[in-house]
Structures are given as C-alpha cells and as structure tokens.
Amino acid sequence: KVGLFYSFTVMVRCAGITIYYCATLVLKLWCIHFLFPIYVHNPHLDALKDDILYHFSLGTGSHNLPAMFGDVKFVCVGGSPWRMKSFTEFIAAELAMEDPKSEYPNICAGTDRYAMYKVGPVLSVSHGMGIPSIAIMLHELIKLLHHAHCTDVTIIRIGTSGGIGLEPGTVVVTKQSVDATFQPKFEQVILGKTVVRSTDLDQSLAQELLQCSKRLNQFETVIGNTMCTLDFYEGQARLDGAFCSYTEADKQEYLLKAKEAEVCNIEMESSVFAAMCKLSGLRAAVVCVTLLDRLKGDQLSSSHEVLNNYQLRPQKLVGSYIKQSLAFFLYNTQNTSYL
Amino acid sequence: KVGLFYSFTVMVRCAGITIYYCATLVLKLWCIHFLFPIYVHNPHLDALKDDILYHFSLGTGSHNLPAMFGDVKFVCVGGSPWRMKSFTEFIAAELAMEDPKSEYPNICAGTDRYAMYKVGPVLSVSHGMGIPSIAIMLHELIKLLHHAHCTDVTIIRIGTSGGIGLEPGTVVVTKQSVDATFQPKFEQVILGKTVVRSTDLDQSLAQELLQCSKRLNQFETVIGNTMCTLDFYEGQARLDGAFCSYTEADKQEYLLKAKEAEVCNIEMESSVFAAMCKLSGLRAAVVCVTLLDRLKGDQLSSSHEVLNNYQLRPQKLVGSYIKQSLAFFLYNTQNTSYL
C-alpha cells in the first residue's frame, strides 16, 4: 500500500510539473503571438546565433536591441537622411523632448547606407531612393523591431512626389499604391519567379491622418491613389531625361489615364513599403507632398525656399498625428513628457 | 552693263556668304556628331531654357558645366558616398594630384541624394542602392556630360557583391549583366509598357581591366556574368531576411543554376548601368569585389577590417587602369601632372 501511495504521489507530482510547463509554454506562445506580434516570417532566423543588420551597422550580438528600441511606437521613414534628421528635431520639439545640448546622434553612424535617429517612442529612418533601397531598409527594420520585441508599431513614410492635377504643395495620403499599369500590386521576384503581393494600406490610419490635417488647417490634404514606379524619368513619362522616345501628347495621355485611375501622385517607394508592412503586420501609411503638377511640367523649377517649405508639410502633419496619438495613449499615465 | 556687273557682284557675294554659313553649319554639326558624341537621345531637351539636374543640385542656368566638367575622361560610380570620397583621395594620390590642404569638396553639396568629387579628368559619383537609384543618377550624369561637351568618356562602376563559388575578396569584372532568370536583358517600363534593353558592356575594356589586374598582381580577378536583382534578401535567395518562404535546398538549387549560367556574382545595379551606358555611347565596365561566398552563407560576418580591405580592391584596380590609360594618352603631351 505504501508503494502504491508513493507511486501515486510521484505521478501527481509529474503531472503537476507537466501541467506547469505546458501552462508556461502556452502563456509564452500567447505572449509571443498577441503581446509581441511576429513581425518576421522566416523560420531560418531562429537558427542564427547572431543576426547582423549589415546596412544599419547593428546586430543582435553587438547591440542590446530591446534596450535600444523596445519602446518604439512610431517609425517615420523618408528618402533623404537630412530630412529624417530635421524630422527628429521637429518631433522632439513637438513632444517637448528637445534637448538643446543634444545633437541627436545617428544610430547607424557605422555606415553611410541609411541614417537613423530616435526621440522617445519615435524612430526616424532614411531609406534612399527607389524600391530596392527601401526594401533593404525595411527587411532590416522589421527584424530590428522583432528582435527588440516592439508591439503596436505604426509606420509612416513621409516623402515627396509629383502630383497629377493638384496644386503644388498639396499633401497626398495614399489610399492604395498602384504600379505603372495602375494595378494595386507589387511584384516580388523570389528564386527567379514573380510573386504578386497586395499593396493595401491601413485605411483607418489614412482617415485619421486626413482628419488630423483638417484640424491642423495649414495646407491642402487629399486622399488618393499613389503610383509607384521603378524610374523617375522614362518610368514617370518625363520629357527631360537623357532618353525620351515619346511625345508631349503621349505623356499627357498616360498621365490623364493615371488620373482616371484616381492616381493623385507619383513616387518610387510606396508599393513595396505597403506590401512589406502588410506582410509584417505593421500599421502603415504613406504621406507625400506634391512638388509640382506633372500635367504642367517636369522640372522642379520652384525656388529652394518654396520646395523646402513644401517638404516640411508631411513632417508637420505626421508630427501632429503622433503628438495627438501619444496624448490619447498616455492620458491616464504619469508619463507626460511626450505631451 | 554697269548694272549687270553690279548685280553679278552682289550675287557672288551672297553666294559666298551662303556657302560660308553652310560650311560653318556643316562643320558645327560634324563637330557635335563626331567630336562631341551625343550622349543624350531626347529631342525635348533643346526646348528647355535651363536644364535643372535636380538630384545633383546643378543646372545649365546656374552652373558653367563645360568649365566645370569639360575635361572629364573617366567617371567612377559606386553605391556609398564615403567610398567614392575615399576613391577620390586614392586616385588623387595615384595621379600625383593630391593636395594635402584640399578636402575634395562635394560638388553636389546642395543635396544629400548623391555625392560627387572631381580630381583632374576623373569624376567620382555615388549612386545609392538599387536600379532606380542608379538610374536617376545616370540620367542626370549623361545630361551633365552632354551639356559639358565631354568626349571619349569611360565609365566604371566599382562596387561590392555576393560571390557564387568564389573565394571572398575575389574581384569580378562583368562580362554580361543578367537578370534573375539569367537573361542578359533589362526591362524598362515606359508609359506603362515594358521595353527590353540590351545589357552588353564593352568587352575590350573588360579585357584591359583583367590584364591590368594581372600586372597589379595583388588579388584574384576573374571575368564572368553578374546577376542584377531588384532585392537584396528574397530576390537573392537569402535565408536571413524578414521574410523567407523557401528552404536552404531551394536556395542552393537556385544559386547553382545561376553558377551554371556563368554567374560569378550578384549585385543590384549592373543591368540598368549597362543598358543606359550602351544607349548613350559611354564605354562602360562593372568591377565588383565579392564580400562572401553565397553558397556558404548569407550574412556578412567578416570583420570590418577585412571587409574594408576587400572594398579597396576595385578602387586599386580601376585606379591603376586610369593611371595607365592617362599615361598612354598623355605620352606626347607636356601635361604630365596626371602621371
């Protein structure tokens, strides 16, 4: 009887331990899936001892990514490193976090491929020009956010573009990113084969940005489709490139067809940005100012002062949106330093 | 009779003036066509009062381009602005034109899109990452060379790449640039339609560079095909991106197929570089060092010192080639400052 009782006790203990481990495993998986959304979709990453984010000059072995980036809630990306630095200074002032002594160090100072700055929960990263350049940045940014266990991240591209039938200086919040044939898709070549990906963006975020601009009431903002091309000159029907085999009439016909497809502006990064953000579960928006009306010309002949003023508009809109969002989230907390 | 003689004299004079103007016009056209090869193929450019090279922050109205660039004979382009600055310092020393007091000012200091440096007849320009980024730069560079009336220009891309079955550090001179399906073509989208362009490079220049490397005898150099992709991660069968839907075996199979198609290395700019240089009549070559063997891995885990040493190799080879070429051209001149 003693033996039986002993066996029973051991079995109960084993069962208890098993239940305990199963429960912690389930809890861990729940945490990973719901509290820490999986931004990456790559089973091979687990096998890496260290993950080197080469184009950022960062890595899991060399940097404590959760400590450096764990609090990130907003990521703003744009082509020019200068513009992303100036956005950092602007957002620091907006959130009352500016430090007159600080120079806002470039976190990616070990490379000249991209520049990265951080102020509180806002990360600002440059991505260069064109789909391949922003795609490299996004692969490494998504891995960075994953390694840093970031949650509930909103990402917004602030950029410049050519408008179609809009007054220069108008800000366009992208409804859908379309390709050069006005289709809402991005073609990714994998192992030599083309895979089509959706370019859907977060519609509620786009509407929130539009409302925010209405409250700001400083410049015209519209919602419309954005055409994303692989080339700035021939790819956008410009007449001022080194090569041009079409007429002014051909150009006008193409741009008017784009306008019929509700294309408001043309730029060079939105399609892969939308596709990769959708795949990774990031809430994403594209906010670009139009520097000229492409129906009226091709060359950026406005003064530097005017163009610089236009380029500040997406920064102002997104800065205002971030300030408002943080005020909402931090309403009941003591941390008012962002407000 | 006096009246007739007078009329005859006037006719002779008129005929003389007409012949004179026709002759100078023919001479001018001959000069433009043969001495100043037309690098651009765009009839609309003549209608522009000023041509603004926006991404260089230069223009025909604001800068004296023939005075600034008329003597350019070699253009070296590469992704990183830092690398192109260091190449400028290197070539200045090679050509005995270094000025210890000079900081080699960035000619495109008014923008952060590209960086440009000049030493004697050598122009060094950065182009960022990917086909769209280098294409914008090349459109404006070709127009710049055209406006500056440059002749006999050789252009060489010096870059980094992933090797296939080569020892890391090997330099590859591109025989032909191929796409992700190993075809020697570049697809340019114009007015929403795809136009296929040839990616032929100058074979004699490639052979001259190979011979030059043999004489230099400092590192292994090979001639082979270069695969040009639109993406660094999924587009190059990497297993370490944010997304990966294929296995290690799939990756190996794809890379071995590339090897069978005589692909020695993979990078992201050569196809549009080759296509645009061929269209514009520029003698062009691509010289890239391999930073790793992609059959053995994906991550750039070599030390910064080793990688920096590798990145100097294309600079050394091209520097040596330029020095040798200038020595040949300037053999009978008094201008030996380049030698």
Image (tube, coloured by chain):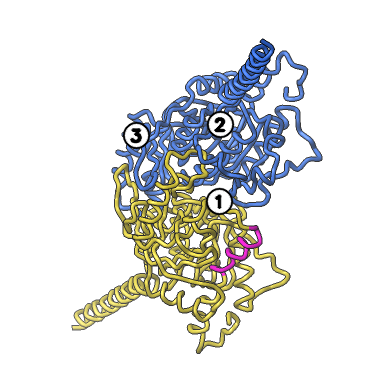
Chain colours: A blue, B yellow
Chain hosting mark 1:
B
Separation (CA) of disc 3 from disc 1:
37 Å
Q: Residues in magenta? A: B303-315
Q: Where's residue B262, x and y in %?
A: 36, 63
Q: Secondary structure at mark 1?
A: loop
Residue B229, above or below A45: below
In the image, what residue type sits under mark 1?
Answer: Gln
Identity, as a three-letter code, of the amino acid under mark 3: Phe
Task: Check residue B310 for magenta coloring.
Answer: yes
The foreground one among A253 and B126 is B126
Q: Secondary structure at mark 3?
A: loop
Q: What secondary structure predominates along the stretch shown in magenta?
A: helix
According to the image, label 1 marks what residue?
A: B299
Q: Quadrant of residue B103?
A: bottom right
> Residue under mark 2: which chain is it in?
A
Of marks 3 and 1, the one in the foreground: 1
Which quarter of the image is occupied by the C terminus of chain A?
top right
Q: What numbered label is drawn on residue A156?
A: 2
**Helix or strand or loop: what does disc 2 sit on?**
strand
Quarter occupied by the N terminus of chain A: top right
Which of marks 3 and 2 precedes in the sequence? Answer: 2
Disc on res. A182 = 3
Pick out the residue farthest to the right. Answer: A101
Extreme-top residue of the structure: A1
Q: Nearer the viewer, mark 2 or mark 1?
A: 1
Q: Is disc 1 surrounded by few (<14), some (14 to 19) or many (20+) residues within 10 Å?
A: many
**Relative to B216, is A200 on the left or the right?**
left
Q: Position of residue A97 (x, y in %)?
A: 75, 30
